[in-house]
Image (cartoon, helix red, strand yellow):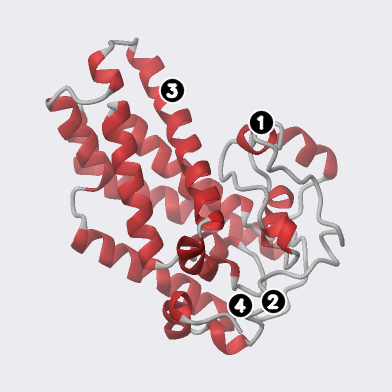
Amino acid sequence: MHILIYQHEMLIRLSCFFGVLIIITLWEFFAPRRQLSVSRSRRWPSNLGIVVVDSVILRLIMPALAIGIAIIARQNQWGLFNIIHFPYWLAVLLSVIALDFVIYLQHVMFHAVPLFWRIHRMHHTDLDIDVTTGLRFHPIEIILSMIIKIGAVILLGAPAISVLIFEVLLNATSMFNHGNIYLPKFADQIIRYLIVTPDMHRVHHSIIKRETHSNFGFNLSIWDRALMTYIAQPKKGHLGMTIGLEIFRDPKNLRLDKLLLIPFLKEK
């Protein structure tokens, strides 16, 4: 079963990726939350182009990736769930939850540590926030994130299926909660008790620093609430807030080549 998962990983991930991307894109077109300040034609080539760059670099440098490591860990009996035998369904569920918490902590670290922030801030330089912003991460951050995930998978002894579920969820929820989509207030309030909603995550992309350094969750919203990094609404409201960072307001920084250079630029 684990080998089968590994063999079909790419097909599963690509199917889910394009399925969610199309759904959120259509949702943005028919029911947008905010008016965009910069056209899609100016932002999307770079935001989607960075996905291609990230994928190629990751496959070249780390071909095994997290699912392959999960299979190796199982074969060698590494990690908690390979040493202590939980029911399989429970090991899968706990692994998905634990990996989500690891990504929350990683996100906090990438904001708190200056060196990591220089890398991560590229994600925050988008002047609007929509489905493609959820895919916009610097290749160095993608590599560091994969190293962290691999370490967590080995320590947990996470089943391969749980790693696949987690990766698909992480990608899908990132596109969802970055989406420029309208949700009725009552629906948002219900959903955000469990899952990070677009209105909840949009606060994280505010130009106001206190709001930038809040709402770090990608999937489960419990981590922000429990660890007091949660801000319910932006100070200036969702329609009045400014997206991005104060030091990167020039639209020329939206070009793909400029995105790749952002970690190496000094703050003015």
Q: Residue at x 60, y 73 (%)?
A: 126
Above or below, 264 relative to 148: below
Q: Looking at this view, is 4 or 137 the one in front?
A: 137
**Of the image marks 1 and 2, the number of the one nearer the N terminus:** 1
Above or below, 46 relative to 98: below
The percent position of residue 176, horizontal first and vertical second, equals 60, 51
- For the residues bearing labels 1 and 2, Cβ distance under 8 angstroms: no
How far apart are the two marked residues, 2 and 4, measured between alpha carbons?
A: 21 Å
**Kind of residue at disc 3:** Leu
What residue does disc 3 label? 93
**Kind of residue at disc 4:** Arg
Q: Looking at this view, is 79 or 90 the one in front?
A: 79
Q: Residue at x 62, y 57 (%)?
A: 178
The percent position of residue 222, horizontal first and vertical second, equals 64, 32
Q: Which mark is residue 246?
A: 2
How far apart are the two marked residues, 3 and 4, measured between alpha carbons?
A: 38 Å
What residue does disc 1 label? 226
**Left or right of residue 102, residue 214 in this image:** right
Helix, strand, or loop for circle 2?
loop
What residue does disc 4 label? 40
**Left or right of residue 163, residue 234 in this image:** right
**Of the image marks 3 and 4, the number of the one nearer the N terminus:** 4
